[in-house]
C-alpha cells in the first residue's frame, strides 16, 4: 500500500521515470504544476476539492525568512503563502490557488467541517524529489504583503496545523476522489481526520517519543531501586541537597564545580556551579539548579520548572532534580520551548548512584552517605 510518511522523501519525476514516480503517478488528477494543487471529485459536483496538495519549493525547514514558507515541527505549524504574483491586471484574490485557500478557510470559519478538504504539504528541496511534511488543516488565513523580485505584493498567508498523523494512505485520498455519495466522503478517513471533522484538532507532537511516562521515571515497586529511592526521600531537604551535590561531584568525564547554596543568599536556587569544556576550548557554562525531595505521588508541575527558567540569566543552564517525576506538560514545555534546562527524575538518580558504584547490597554505601548526612 502506497503511503506518505512525515519526513520521508519521494520521487517526483513523472517525465523521466514514469514507473518510479511517487507523486503525480500516485495522485492522479493532481496535475504537475503550481504550488497549490486541488484534486477534484470525479463523481460529486461540489465547489470544494477532494483534497489539496501544497508544495513549497527550495525552502529548508526552519528558514525564518518572512517571505518564505515555514515548516516548524516544534510548534506543529506550517506558514504557507498563496500564489499571488506581480500582475497589473489581477487582484491577489483572483489567483486560482488563493481562491481555493479562501474558500477552504471560509468553511473553517463556518465550522462546515464535512466540506473541508485534507491538505498535504510537501517540500521540493531538490530536483526530482519531494519531502512529505504532514497532513494539515487551515487554522488562519490573513492578507499581508510579500516581496516578489523587489516589489511588495498583497497576498494570502495561511497558518496550517500539522495533524498528529505520521502516515497518510494514498488509497484514502483516491477513495475520496472516487466517492459517489457526498455523505460518505469521510467514511474511510483515518481516526485523526474523523476527529477533526467532529471539531477536535490534535496537533502533531514532535517530541512525544521523548516524553517519559510516570512509570519510566520511577523504579518499579518492591525492588532494590525503590528502596534506595525511599531512603533518599527519608532524608531532610537539606540532607538531600547535600547528597545530590556530592553525587554530582563524583561524576567523571567533564570538569565541573558545584556548590550548595543553603548557607548563602542563593536567589532561590539549591546549588550553583559551572561546567568547563576541556582543552583546547576551555569554555565555561554556568548552571543553577533545584533539588526537590518529593514522594512518588507528588509530581513536578510546569509552574515549578518555569520558575527555574525565569531565574536563569543569559548563557546560564538549569538543572532540576527530584526523587519524584515530571508531568507530561512540564516535559513538553521544556522540549517545545527549547528551555536550557535538564530534568532528572527518581530513576535518573538511581542510575547516577549505580554509575558511580555507590550502591552496595541493594543500598547506597553507608559510609559514603553517613559522611555527608552527619555533617548536616
Image: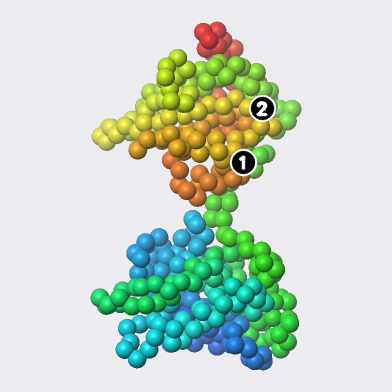
Hey, which quadrant is residue 83 in on the image? bottom left
Compared across the picture, whether 370 is left or right of 66 comes to right
Q: Is residue 329 depicted above or below 346 in this figure?
A: below
Which residue is label 2 attached to? 295
| Residue 64 shows up from this direction | yes
- Location of the N terminus (image quadrant): bottom right
Q: Secondary structure at mark 1?
A: loop
Question: Residue 6, image x and y in percent?
Answer: 53, 65
Question: Residue lying furthest top in this view?
Answer: 374
How many numbered tags mark residues here? 2
For residue 207, side relative to residue 90 (left or right): right
Q: Earlier in the sequence, mark 2 or mark 1?
A: 2
Residue beneath the point at 45% across and 14% down: 263
- The CA distance from mark 2 to mark 1 is 14 Å
Q: Which mark is residue 35?
A: none
Task: For residue 17, say whether it is visible.
Answer: no
Q: Which mark is residue 327?
A: 1
Amino acid at each position: 500500500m502506497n503511503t506518505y510518511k512525515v519526513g520521508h522523501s519521494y520521487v517526483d519525476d513523472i517525465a523521466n521515470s514514469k514507473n518510479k514516480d511517487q507523486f503525480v503517478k500516485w495522485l492522479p488528477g493532481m496535475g504537475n504544476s503550481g504550488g497549490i494543487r486541488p484534486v477534484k471529485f470525479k463523481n460529486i459536483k461540489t465547489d470544494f476539492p477532494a483534497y489539496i496538495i501544497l508544495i513549497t519549493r527550495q525552502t529548508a525547514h526552519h528558514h525564518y525568512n518572512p517571505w518564505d514558507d515555514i515548516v516548524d515541527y516544534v510548534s506543529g505549524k506550517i506558514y504557507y503563502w498563496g500564489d499571488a504574483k506581480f500582475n497589473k491586471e489581477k487582484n491577489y484574490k483572483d489567483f486560482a490557488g488563493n481562491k481555493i485557500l479562501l474558500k477552504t478557510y471560509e468553511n473553517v470559519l463556518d465550522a462546515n467541517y464535512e466540506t473541508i478538504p485534507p491538505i498535504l504539504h510537501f517540500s521540493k528541496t531538490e530536483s526530482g524529489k519531494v519531502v512529505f511534511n504532514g497532513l494539515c488543516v487551515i487554522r488562519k488565513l490573513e492578507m499581508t504583503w510579500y516581496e516578489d523580485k523587489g516589489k511588495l505584493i498583497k497576498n494570502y498567508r495561511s497558518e496550517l496545523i500539522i495533524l498528529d498523523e505520521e502516515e497518510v494512505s494514498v488509497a484514502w485520498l483516491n477513495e475520496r476522489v472516487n466517492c459517489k455519495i457526498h455523505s460518505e466522503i469521510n467514511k474511510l478517513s483515518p481516526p485523526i481526520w474523523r476527529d477533526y471533522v467532529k471539531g477536535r484538532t490534535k496537533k502533531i507532537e514532535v517530541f512525544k517519543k521523548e516524553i517519559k511516562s510516570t512509570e519510566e521515571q520511577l523504579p518499579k515497586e518492591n525492588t532494590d531501586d525503590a528502596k534506595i529511592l525511599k531512603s533518599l526521600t527519608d532524608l531532610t531537604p537539606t540532607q538531600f541537597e547535600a547528597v545530590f551535590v556530592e553525587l554530582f561531584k563524583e561524576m567523571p568525564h567533564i570538569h565541573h564545580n558545584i556548590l550548595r547554596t543553603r548557607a548563602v543568599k542563593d536567589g532561590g536556587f539549591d546549588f550553583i556551579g559551572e561546567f568547563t569544556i576541556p582543552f583546547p576550548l576551555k569554555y565555561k557554562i554556568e548552571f543553577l539548579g533545584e533539588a526537590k525531595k518529593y514522594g512518588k505521588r507528588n509530581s513536578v508541575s510546569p509552574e515549578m520548572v518555569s520558575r527555574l527558567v525565569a531565574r536563569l540569566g543569559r548563557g546560564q543552564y538549569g538543572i532540576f532534580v527530584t526523587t519524584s517525576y515530571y508531568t507530561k506538560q512540564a516535559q513538553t514545555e521544556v522540549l517545545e520551548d527549547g528551555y536550557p534546562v535538564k530534568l532528572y527524575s527518581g530513576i535518573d538518580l538511581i542510575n547516577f548512584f549505580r554509575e558511580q558504584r555507590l550502591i552496595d547490597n541493594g543500598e547506597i554505601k553507608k559510609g559514603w552517605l553517613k559522611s555527608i548526612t552527619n555533617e548536616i
